[in-house]
Image (tube, helix red, strand yellow):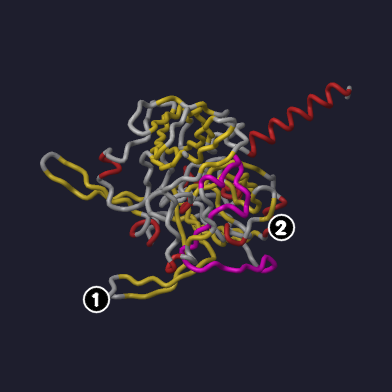
């Protein structure tokens, strides 16, 4: 290569690295939000870990050490020498695959923004989200190799993590049992080519907190569906219902039917359209508001409102993956004092991220799927 080409190549690599590292190109002082989330309450400290404030999530790829983790039961320590992934049920060819066998299959990678469905639904859960490059074997190829039976309806994913459950507590019908964490999805959804049996995260082995040695990565689905510490896949000929499909991770809303109000219950599944202001940066006497937007479909625009002003269109960064967040930024001629900053995303189908007063949010009685417009508070000196 000629010297000019080498310099050009190095410059382009530097630009690419910058876009990986920062929301915008503003290299300045981060102005802290004044509405910082409360700490995780002690009873939940073993459940929710690794919450990184939005203003510290300043890269398109979230480093492993800054990635949140949630454990519904225990956090298992797994010996890979004896661990196997069992594929059974409504299949013609049951399998028990070692980690080495999975790694010997064709390697696939997907960049996917993983969000907990409780994000922004609880006072402490304001940043249970992260974007990573996930690597592993194709789930659909493994299911094909297992020869799915014609009667199979759903695919159930079981984690190694276990816990105690009680049904109808305090009644003569009370029953206690030990069970593994599990979630299911229809066969057609499981066969999505983007789904991975993932063993690497950002080029390294899965961290123990994020599912080592294997987890499901199902782009477009909330975190709860992306089962960690995966140990068994079972194809079943009827709908699968357990705590995490039918009793917990259920969104309850008041819905009007004519003159009657009913409580509608739906199981948490696919991610919803959302955006969030991430940080305010001061540089060269100016200010820039930066944030991210994501959802099940492509983002067409992000608009920002400051205090009670009009909605203003932000600048959208390029889309790097159909399953990942897009960064956005807005130059701001800020004045001294306290300010409220709100963002809303719009997808290519014209769907608008709902306001907090929208009935779909305001009439929700549970904290799952809280994709209402997020307002952050900041003080400009």
Q: Quadrant of residue 372?
A: top left
Crowd band around label 1 with a 10 angstrom C-alpha radius: few (<14), some (14–19), many (20+):
few
Mark whose residue sits in front, 1 or 2: 1
Frontmost residue, 176 versus 21: 21
Frontmost residue, 130 versus 276: 276
Frontmost residue, 37 versus 359: 37
Residue 42 in the image: above or below residue 144: below
Residue at the disc numbered 1: 171
Q: Residue furthest bottom?
A: 172
Element on which disc 1 rests: loop
Residue at the disc numbered 2: 100
Element on which disc 2 rests: helix
For the record, the magenta segment spans 54-82
| Dot 1 or dot 2, earlier in sequence | 2
Q: Which residue is at a point 61% across and 62% down the rendered structure image?
A: 208
Q: Which residue is at a point 82% across and 26% down the rendered structure image?
A: 7
């Amino acid at each position: 290569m000629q010297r000019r080409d080498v310099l050009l190549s190095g410059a382009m690599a530097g630009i690419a690295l910058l876009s990986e590292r920062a929301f915008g190109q503003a290299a300045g002082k981060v102005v802290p939000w004044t509405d910082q989330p409360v700490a995780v309450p002690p009873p939940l400290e073993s459940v929710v870990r690794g919450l990184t404030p939005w203003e510290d999530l300043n890269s398109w790829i979230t480093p492993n050490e800054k990635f949140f983790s949630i454990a519904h039961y225990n956090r298992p320590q797994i010996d890979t020498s004896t661990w196997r992934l069992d594929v059974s049920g409504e299949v013609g060819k049951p399998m028990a695959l070692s980690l080495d066998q999975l790694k010997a299959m064709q390697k696939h990678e997907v960049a996917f923004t993983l969000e907990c469905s409780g994000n922004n639904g609880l006072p402490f859960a304001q940043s249970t989200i992260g974007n990573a490059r996930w690597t592993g074997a194709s789930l659909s190829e493994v299911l094909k190799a297992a020869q799915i039976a014609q009667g199979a309806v759903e695919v159930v994913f079981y984690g190694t993590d276990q816990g105690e459950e009680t049904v109808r507590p305090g009644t003569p019908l009370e029953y206690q049992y030990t069970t593994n964490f599990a979630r299911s999805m229809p066969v057609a959804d499981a066969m999505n080519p983007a789904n991975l049996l993932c063993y690497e995260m950002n080029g390294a082995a899965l961290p123990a907190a994020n599912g080592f040695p294997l987890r499901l990565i199902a782009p477009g689905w909330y975190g709860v569906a992306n089962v960690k510490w995966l140990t068994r896949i079972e194809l079943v000929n009827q709908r699968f219902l357990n705590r995490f499909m039918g009793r917990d991770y259920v969104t309850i809303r008041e819905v009007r039917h004519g003159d009657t109000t009913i409580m509608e219950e739906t199981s948490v599944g696919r991610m919803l359209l959302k955006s969030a202001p991430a940080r305010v940066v001061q540089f060269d006497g100016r200010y820039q508001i930066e944030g991210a937007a994501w959802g099940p479909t492509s983002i067409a625009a992000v608009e920002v409102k400051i205090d009670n002003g009009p909605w203003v269109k932000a600048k959208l960064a390029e889309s790097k993956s159909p399953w990942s967040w897009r960064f956005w930024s807005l130059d701001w001629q800020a004045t001294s004092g306290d300010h409220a900053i709100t963002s809303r995303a719009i997808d290519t189908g014209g769907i608008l991220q709902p306001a907090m007063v929208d009935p779909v949010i305001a009439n929700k009685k549970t904290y799952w799927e809280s994709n209402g417009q997020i307002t952050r508070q900041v003080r400009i000196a």
